[in-house]
Amino acid sequence: MGFNFYDFTTFTHNLHLWFMEHMSPGWATTVEWVIVGVIYLAFVALLGLFLIWAERRVCAVFQQRLGPNRVGLWGLIQTIADFLKLMVKEIITPRKVDKFLYNLAPYIVVICMFLTLGAIPFAPGLQGLDFDIGVFYLSSISSLSVIGILLAGWSSNNKYSLIGGIRSGAQIISYELSVAMSLITMVILAGTMQFSGIVEGQRDLWFIFKGHIPALIAFIVFLIAGTAETNRGPFDLPEAESELTAGFHTEYSGIKFALFYLSEFINMFIVSAVAATVFLGGWMPLHFGGLEAFNHVMDFIPPIIWFFLKTFGLVFVLMWFKWTFPRLRVDQILTLEWKYLLPINLFNILLMTIVVLTKFHF
Amino acid sequence: MKSIIEYIVSIFKGLSSLLAGMRVTGKYAFTPWKNVTIQYPDVRPVMTDRFRGEVIMPHNENNEHKCTACGICEMNCPNGSIEVISKTITTPEGKKKRVLDQYIYHLGMCTFCNLCVKACPSDAIDMGKNFELAVWDRTKLNKVLNQPGSKIAEGVKE
């Protein structure tokens, strides 16, 4: 099959050929879809469990505590036990909710999460969807999840949920602009919207070094806006515990609550993965143009490990944000976006255009 | 122009204050040996001097306590958690003397206010350092503090 831990392209291609050889093209495509779907499902389940565990350990560390450490090695089994508890809990549908929308909302959020995850390149050849408009696709799909949150808030027939949902709508629609614009800044530098092309463009130097000042500004803006878009960190207004009990998912219980909870953590992973891909080279090892020996040493570490190292590093930074900064008020959130991030972004796009036109980059 | 400068300065001030906050939590994160968690059932903490657990009556090695059964602690207790039961004995010299029979302490009613310890003229009672006070049966909360067969120590001022 030609399995190679450094490049999955030939492996997946040979697998495709093998399927085509042994069954009709229609069946081969169906089987491939099922396999890819199962892989993504398993990946999301494991990743969600791991991220929830990591969040609890990391937040404990920021508060000089230890966190869960008694169930299994370093408490790794803790989230599995919690998940089992959530699975056996009763799924309550309150009497006066809009039943159809209430039951639909968590699935919209989860579907958006999966669609976004599909566009992320994990390693060469390991990418669900490689559109030539990948960045555009990602920013459009990721903003769809607000519909699920709004529906959850609206259909719960509960004032806390409604306020949470509306807050989330105002917040995500505002910050979507900053996310898209900071990505556009990097698209100007990369010259392509395709994720594989963006990663390939960083073979000589990661974009955050290549684009120096404007890339750094775009990176900071993307991290702030991305945190806001995942409804966590200092921007967790939609589920502000102290004001809105739990915001838009107050009325959800059992596995439906687990879906919201899971999607929040996977969205954090997605934001970190996109930041790692666009700014820090994705699966591309640390390369410096001209230093051949150094590049060769770096190539020994498989790309998939590079990808997860960078992504989890950024996940750690996002957790650092969450457990350091106090929650913003609604007016402060909108001020930050419309009076600060948006003008900075517009200026930054101009700066990046000048940098690219004058070839004033590395 | 002035407002533009103020705007830019405010951005950098904001960023630097955020970084200051992250430096504080980062210091906590990267010094895990300073964690304050005590892994309780495995590691049992030693309570500080001023910790107020249950009321105890210290006895010396000869099974002697210092209680004169004066009842001041009982009067000072706001909740009625102390009952001092005394009896009258005749000393070898032929004097009648009031001594402690039973010092009953109702832990369930105690608020650990320390007033009895402060009021005691002969320092006969003290606040213990034990904090694992939960029991399965409510009757176990009524304790007799003086040990069986104990008597008052020599030289305690009546």
Image (cartoon, coloured by chain):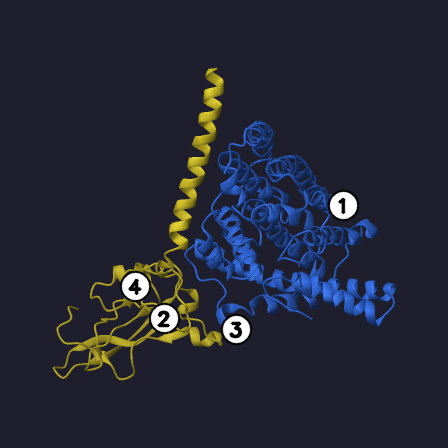
Chain colours: A blue, B yellow
Which residue does the numbered mark 3 point to in the structure image?
A72
Question: What number is the disc on residue A151?
Answer: 1
Tell me the kind of residue under disc 2: Arg
Do the residues under discs 1 and 3 have CB atoms within 8 angstroms? Answer: no
Mark 4 = which residue?
Answer: B73
Nearer the observer, A231 or A32:
A32
Mark 2 → mark 4, Cα distance in angstroms: 31 Å
Residue found 27% across the figure and 68% down from its top: B125
- The residue tagged 2 is B44
Q: Looking at the picture, do discs 4 and 3 lie on one chain?
A: no
- Would you say residue A340 is visible in this rendering? no
Q: CA distance from mark 1 to mark 2?
A: 50 Å
Q: Residues within 10 Å of mark 4 (few under 14, many from 20)?
A: many
Q: To which quarter of the image does residue A190 belong? A: top right
Q: The residue under label 3 is which amino acid type?
A: Gly
Sequence order check: which comes first, mark 1 or mark 3?
A: 3
Foreground label between 2 and 3: 3
Q: Mark 4, mark 3: which one is toward the viewer?
A: 3
Question: Which chain is indicated by disc 1?
Answer: A
Residue B1 pos. (x, y %): 48, 15
Q: Pick the residue in front: A132 or B94.
A: A132
**Neighbourhood count class around disc 1 (C-alpha, 10 Å): few under 14, some 14–19, many 20 upward:** many
Q: CA distance from mark 4 to mark 3?
A: 51 Å
Give the distance between the C-alpha atoms of the residues marked 1 and 4, in whole angstroms. 65 Å
Residue A167 is left or right of residue A102, and the answer is left
